[in-house]
Every structure is written in C-alpha cells, then in structure tokens.
C-alpha cells in the first residue's frame, strides 16, 4: 500500500511539464486512480480496519493533493517568470518624443545668402506677393504692349493687380524706400502660369539683388556673382556669361551654371543642354532709375535675379524641382 503511495508521490514530483502533471493527476487522483483502488475492497474489511483504511485514504489524499498543488504552483511560477522576462520593459529609458522639424532647404540657402550679403553691407528687403502692374512691369521698362510681358506668363487678379512674376519689383520699391546709394537683396516667392516639369514650377523662389552707387561697373557685378557662387558651392563650379535681354538692364547677361545633376552631358533638368539658367543680371537700365526718381547722370548700378529654387537644386543635386514643394517627409528629412 505504502509503495503505491510513494510511487504516486514520486511521479507527481518528477513530472517535468504541466501537461505531464495533469496526466498524473488523472491517473492518481482520478476515479480509476490509486485512491479509488484503496477504497475498492472496503466492503470486505472489518469495522476497525475500515476506520483505519478511511484515515489512510484521507491522509494519502491530502498528501497527494498538496504534492500535486505544490508541483503545479512551481510550474506556474516558472511560466510567469518566463513571461515577465519576455515582457520586461525598462521604464527608465527616456521616451522618444516628437521628431524635431528642420528648415526647408530653400530657407536654409536663403538665410545663408542673406548672411553673406549683410556682411557686405546689403539690406534685406521684403515685397508684396500681390503686386501692381506698375511695379511688376511698367516701372521696369516693360510697358503694356512690350513683347517682354510674354516672357513671363502672368496670373492676373481681379482689379488689375497680379501675382508677381519675379522679385524685380522690389528693386523699384527698394529705390523708392532707401534712395541712392543703396545695396539690397530681396528673396521671395514668385508665380508664373507655366507648365510644370523637372525644372519649372508655377510657384518658386528668386532672390533679387541690386546695388546703386556712382561708377558701378560690370566688374563689380561679376565680383559679387563670383562671391555668391563661391559661398554657396564652396568649390569650383563652371559658369558661363552670355548676353541676355531684360528690358530693365542694359547690358544684360545670362549667367548659366554647368548642370550639377548630370555634370554636362545633358539630362531632363538642363533640358539636355548641360547648362542651367541661374543668375540673369546686368546694369540697371537708366529708364528704371528715372521711373524711380533717380538721376541716371549721377547714379548707376547693377541688378541680378537669382533663381533661388534652381540654386537649391544644384547645391543638393535634386533632380526634380517638384520635390521641393511636395511636402513629402521622406524628402524633407534629408535636410
Ligand atoms: C527674371 O525673372 C528677371 N527678373 C531676372 C533679372 C533680375 C534679370 C535683375 C536682370 C536683372 P528669368 O525669367 O530668367 O528672369 O528668371 C530668373 C531665374 O529664375 C531663372 O534664371 C531661373 O533660374 C529661375 N526660373 C525662371 N522660371 C522658373 C520656373 N518656372 N521655375 C523655377 N525657376 C525658374
């Protein structure tokens, strides 16, 4: 009898998994288990023996049950420890928090150029995006019937105003505000009713520059253009200067940069030409000075209209201008 009990206890203690323990429970404590076997022949026993057997069954049942519960608890504790291990969290690690934003690449380059020109004595001016026809065209020597008006497809507004097609109207406002001698730049957003492609947007940024003084020459203009490009690219870039026509400068030039996307052989950004129009410039036309109330016999100057968005494309080798206004965070996070 005792042997039977000892081996049942040993099986409970030796069960190595919860499943095995459950099988042992059915076998030992179940209807066909050891305990049932002990009560089988009760009917054949004397009253005294029955009392003794009853006691034995009770104590054995308690011993088996408590051994079983103890073993079950040890399995549960082990399972819990394993789960806690797997789910362990270090609550002292600082939370990641929101990702910090960054300045748009156009703003970054604009600020760099502003700092550079401020250091050379230039003021930074702002002008309205909704402009008068006078400031955007007439005062810049582009009267209503002038063919140059077709060079820039204009968004006209009700009442005769327009969305400025370039930052050049700030030249006029700058002269009106500051008077000569003056050095100013004017970065800003401009709008053209154009077909959008890899290098043309309907809304883009330019940065106007102007210097009015006595005896300003093309040499001064070239000096400032070189200084500007050197500061932005911090390496040698190939440029070419060719005659360009703008009614508000005379002589006028187009300053093109060797395409930094393809390096010269041609690509969609440079329209397969190897060159990108970047920095039209020239000496301010005396008509513009006169329209702004300045005597061209005493004062002259240079002006330039940097394609700021295109400059940013060249600086970061961005192969499609549409990325810049896409709002796509995968693009923006690179800056
Ligand atoms: C002008 O807008 C003149 N106001 C520039 C100027 C100022 C000339 C002062 C002389 C003196 P243009 O239309 O070429 O010029 O534009 C200037 C620059 O803006 C271009 O060289 C180019 O870099 C950029 N640009 C022109 N159109 C677009 C466009 N649709 N998308 C992106 N950049 C453009």
Image (tube, helix red, strand yellow):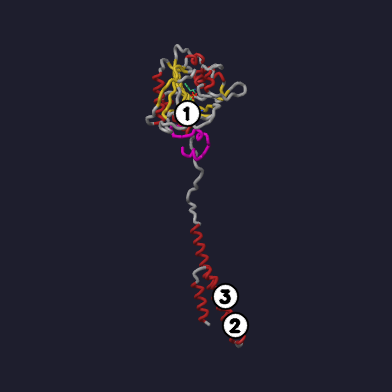
Q: In this view, does 11 lie to the left or right of 47?
A: left
The mark that comes first in sequence, 1 or 2, is 2
Do the CB atoms of the residues marked 1 and 2 lie less than 8 Å apart? Answer: no
177 part of magenta stretch: no
Between marks 3 and 1, how big is the CA–CA gap? Answer: 87 Å
Q: Count neighbours of disc 3 (C-alpha within 10 A) and say few if under 14, some if 14 to 19, many if 20 or more.
A: some
Q: Position of residue 193 (x, y in %)?
A: 56, 27
Between marks 1 and 2, how big is the CA–CA gap? Answer: 101 Å
Q: Name the residue under label 2.
A: 40
Q: In this view, does 213 lie above or below 272?
A: above
Q: Is residue 189 left or right of residue 236?
A: right
Foreground label between 1 and 2: 1
Q: Position of residue 319 (x, y in %)?
A: 46, 34
Q: Mark 1 points at which residue?
A: 308
The mark that comes first in sequence, 3 or 1, is 3
Instruction: Find the magenta span and give its range.
Output: 313-335
Residue 78 seen in the current view: yes
Q: Is residue 313 left or right of residue 195?
A: left
């Amino acid at each position: 009898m005792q042997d039977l009990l000892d081996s049942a206890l040993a099986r409970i203690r030796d069960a190595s998994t919860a499943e095995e323990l459950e099988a042992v429970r059915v076998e030992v404590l179940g209807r066909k288990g050891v305990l049932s076997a002990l009560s089988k022949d009760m009917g054949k026993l004397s009253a005294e023996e029955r009392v003794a057997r009853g006691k034995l069954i009770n104590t054995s049942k308690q011993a088996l049950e408590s051994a079983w519960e103890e073993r079950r608890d040890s399995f549960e504790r082990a399972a819990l420890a394993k789960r806690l291990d797997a789910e362990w969290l270090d609550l002292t690690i600082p939370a990641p928090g929101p990702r910090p934003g960054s300045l748009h690449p156009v703003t970054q380059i604009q600020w760099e150029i502003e700092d550079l020109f401020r250091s050379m004595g230039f003021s930074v001016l702002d002008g309205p995006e909704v402009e008068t026809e006078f400031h955007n065209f007439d005062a810049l020597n582009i009267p209503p019937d002038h063919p140059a008006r077709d060079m820039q497809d204009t968004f006209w507004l009700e009442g005769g105003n327009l969305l400025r097609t370039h930052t050049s109207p700030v030249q006029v406002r700058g002269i009106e505000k500051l008077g000569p001698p003056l050095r100013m730049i004017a970065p800003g957003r401009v709008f053209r009713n154009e077909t959008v492609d890899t290098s043309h947007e309907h809304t883009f940024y330019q940065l106007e520059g102007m210097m009015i003084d006595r005896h300003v020459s093309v040499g001064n203009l070239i000096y400032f253009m070189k200084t500007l490009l050197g500061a932005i690219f911090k390496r040698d870039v190939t440029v070419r200067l060719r005659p360009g026509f703008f009614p508000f400068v005379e002589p006028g030039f187009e300053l093109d940069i060797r395409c930094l996307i393809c390096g010269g052989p041609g690509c969609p950004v440079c329209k397969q030409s190897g060159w990108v129009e970047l920095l039209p410039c020239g000496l301010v036309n005396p008509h513009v000075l006169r329209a702004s109330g300045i005597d061209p016999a005493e004062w002259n100057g240079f002006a330039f209209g940097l394609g700021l968005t295109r400059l940013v494309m060249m600086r970061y080798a961005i192969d499609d201008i549409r990325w810049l206004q896409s709002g796509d965070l995968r693009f923006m996070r690179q800056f």
